[in-house]
Amino acid sequence: TGSDPLIGARLGEYVVEERIGQGGMGVVYRARQPLIGKQVAVKLLRGSLSKDPAAVQRLITEAQVVNAIGHRGIIDIFSFGELPDGRRYFLMEYL
């Protein structure tokens, strides 16, 4: 397997450290805030899906629904962004 170009990249104040999973819609990474060491999980929409408005809306809806529930048993999603190449992602608690 080739190296993942996202490893070592910065997403806001976080540095992507490793790929921890993948699924049909995207890939999940572990990232860390270098100064304080806070770890987060990054869910990144696959490149091809980032050009599909319905898939992007699905990712946004997922983040909105999770945050609307607001239950301690549900992972907190606290940021949403876009890479320079157009891929969308959100940052959530890393458990």
Image: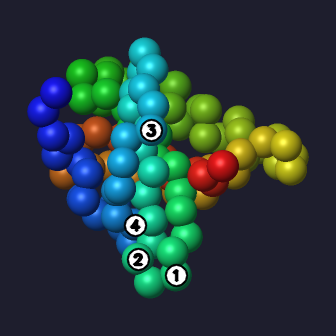
Position above or below: 74 against 2: below
Which residue is found at the position 34% from the left and 64% from the top?
A: 15
Which residue is found at the position 24% from the left and 59% from the top?
A: 9
CA gap between label 1 and label 4 equals 10 Å
Query: What number is the disc on residue 36?
Result: 1
- Residue density around tag 2, few if under 14, some if 14–19, many if 20 or more, within 10 Å: few
Query: What quarter of the picture does the N terminus occupy?
Result: top left
Which mark lies nearer to you, 2 or 4?
Answer: 2
Q: Relative to residue 86, is residue 89 drawn left or right?
A: right
* Nearer-N-terminus badge (2/3): 3
Specify the farthest residue to the front.
1
The residue beneath circle 4 is 14
Q: Tell me residue 11's x, y (percent).
A: 34, 61
Q: Relative to residue 44, is residue 73 drawn left or right?
A: right
CA gap between label 2 and label 4 equals 7 Å
Query: What number is the disc on residue 34?
Result: 2
Position above or below: 11 against 67: below
Q: In the rendered image, which quarter is residue 49 located in? A: top left
* Nearer-N-terminus badge (1/4): 4
* Nearer-N-terminus badge (2/4): 4
Q: What is the three-letter code of the residue carrying label 1?
A: Ile
The residue beneath circle 3 is 20
* Nearer-N-terminus badge (3/4): 4
Q: Tell me residue 76's x, y (percent).
A: 69, 51
Q: Please say which color scheme the image uses.
A: rainbow
Q: What is the three-letter code of the residue carrying label 3?
A: Ile
Q: What is the three-letter code of the residue carrying label 4?
A: Tyr
